[in-house]
Image (spheres, grey):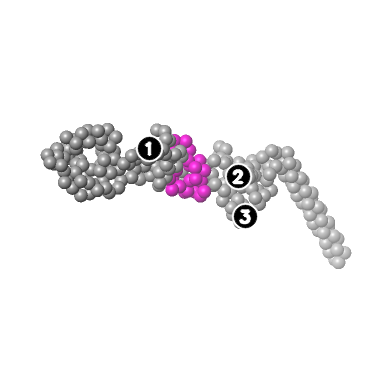
Amino acid sequence: MLQFLNRLFSVLCFQFLCLKMVSSLLNCFVDKSKHSHRETSEDCQSCLECSRDNGCVRCPERLFLFLQRKGMSHHGTCLHSCPNGHFGQRGRDVNRCMKCRSSDCELCFSRDFCTKCKPGFKLHKGKCLIQCPEGTFAHQTDCLEVCPLPPLGEWSEWSVCVRDGATCGFRWGKQTRVREKATEKASVCSPQRETQRCRMKKKCPTGKRERSRAAQNQFKDHKGPPGHTLDTLLYSLSSQSIGKMYLLIDV
């Protein structure tokens, strides 16, 4: 009986050793096959782990895993920087290229914050817009809170000191001057403009008050093009009607 048990034990040990050896050989063959595929496939040259069907599944520490959909599956690639429309998100196990939420976003810092928009859109506070919001100025690819002024020329002469269209009859009035931009296409901003308080002749010469009032009424009834302001009209008086105003005073 004892001899039978010894023989049975020997047979079982032999079978166990044989199975273990076969398993080791199979594992070695599989590892060599994977290693061979990783070296021969262009998609797997930068991978730490690679799948024949899905490309890279794990990347080196400094690279980003970019998954690109191909049919019903995803194909992975290890990249130094993420492509347009994606941003790099670093993680403990793997760094991934994540897609920007907005399809109008060419580059983004995070999922919801764009840093560059596609052509035809303006960037404003991390969003890509077709038109800049009210109170902002379109400049190249951005919407700016402050209008960028181009190189400007010299200041014009101060306009005639007027108040409500009259050049006398009041103690104080206003005069203005402008500084035009160098070229028409240099900026979307309005010309730079200054207005200051000025002293007027409180008493008009004899017979001039009626003419001054007539000029005042003419000023109130004047309807210029849309967008004309008081400063615009004052400057118009100084540049176009200054001769007429002096003739009115000297009569």
Tell me: 120 left or right of 164. Answer: right
Q: In this view, does 4 lie above or below 79?
A: below
Mark closer to the chain start, 3 or 2: 2
Q: Quadrant of the C terminus?
A: top left
Q: How crowded is mark 2: few (under 14 residues within 10 Å), some or many (20 or more)?
A: some
Foreground residue, 185 or 107? 185
Task: State yes or no: residue 208 in magenta.
Answer: no
Q: In this view, does 51 lie to the left or right of 223?
A: right
Q: As shown in the figure, which amino acid type bears the numbered disc 3?
A: Asp
- 16 relative to 79, above or below: below
Q: Position of residue 168 (x, y in %)?
A: 19, 43
Can see residue 210? no
Q: Which residue is drawn at 51% across and 49% down?
A: 110
Please state which amino acid type lies under the numbered disc 1. Answer: Glu
Tag of residue 81: 2
Residue 160, percent across and down? Answer: 26, 40
Q: Which residue is drawn at 33% across and 39% down?
A: 157
Instruction: Please state the extent of the stretch shown in magenta in the rendering.
Output: 103-132
Disc number lying in front (2 or 1): 1
Q: Magenta includes 104?
A: yes
Q: Name the residue under label 3.
A: 93
Crowd class of label 1 (few under 14; some 14 to 19; many from 20; radius 10 Å): some
- The crowding category of the residue bearing disc 3, from other C-alpha atoms within 10 Å (few below 14, some 14 to 19, many at least 20), is few
Residue pointed to by mark 1: 180
